[in-house]
């Protein structure tokens, strides 16, 4: 949980945002039950949303990687999960 929260806080800090702006956390559906992710979502008071590799692979991302592609079937998890979460949160991106 601490590692997940540190990563979230780092991204938020870079964007000039605080935790209050987080509406959900997203990940690969196969990892949505991992204790660290579940606990981090609970600390943030937001839902943890799981997406299939196919859903994530359908999202164009600026930094695709062969490593997650080989391991999970999608070239991005974090970058692809953000627009998926936004859509499920009722804020479809243009």
Image (tube, rainbow, N blue to C red):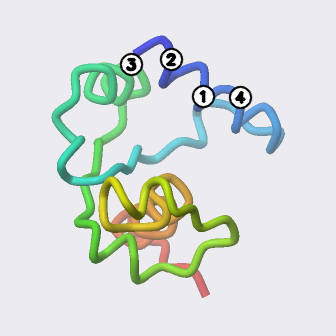
Q: Nearer the viewer, mark 2 or mark 4?
A: 2
Q: Nearer the viewer, mark 3 or mark 1?
A: 1
Q: Are marks 4 and 1 in contact (CB under 8 Å)?
A: yes
Point out the tag, 4 or 3, that comes first from the N-terminus: 4
Give the alpha-carbon distance from disc 2 to disc 1, as whole Å: 6 Å
Give the alpha-carbon distance from disc 3 to disc 1, as whole Å: 14 Å
Q: Which residue occupies the foreground of this view, 46 or 36?
A: 36
Residue 10 badge: 4
Q: Nearer the viewer, mark 4 or mark 3?
A: 4
Answer few, some or many: residues within 10 Å of disc 3's Cα (few below 14, many 20 plus, some between 14 and 19).
few
* Relative to 16, 63 lies left or right: left
Residue 71, given in percent of the width and then of the height, sits at 33, 53
Q: Which residue occupies the foreground of this view, 32 or 45?
A: 32
Residue 7 badge: 1
Q: Residue at x 59, y 32 (%)?
A: 8
Q: Are marks 2 and 1 in contact (CB under 8 Å)?
A: yes
Point out the tag, 2 or 4, that comes first from the N-terminus: 2
Give the alpha-carbon distance from disc 2 to disc 4, as whole Å: 11 Å
């Amino acid at each position: 949980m601490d590692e997940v929260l540190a990563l979230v806080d780092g991204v938020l800090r870079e964007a000039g945002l605080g935790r209050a702006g987080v509406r959900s956390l997203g990940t690969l559906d196969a990892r949505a039950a991992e204790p660290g992710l579940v606990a981090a979502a609970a600390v943030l008071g937001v839902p943890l949303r799981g997406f299939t590799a196919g859903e994530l692979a359908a999202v164009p991302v600026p930094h695709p990687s062969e490593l997650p592609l080989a391991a999970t079937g999608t070239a991005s998890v974090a970058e692809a999960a953000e627009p998926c979460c936004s859509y499920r949160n009722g804020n479809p991106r243009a």
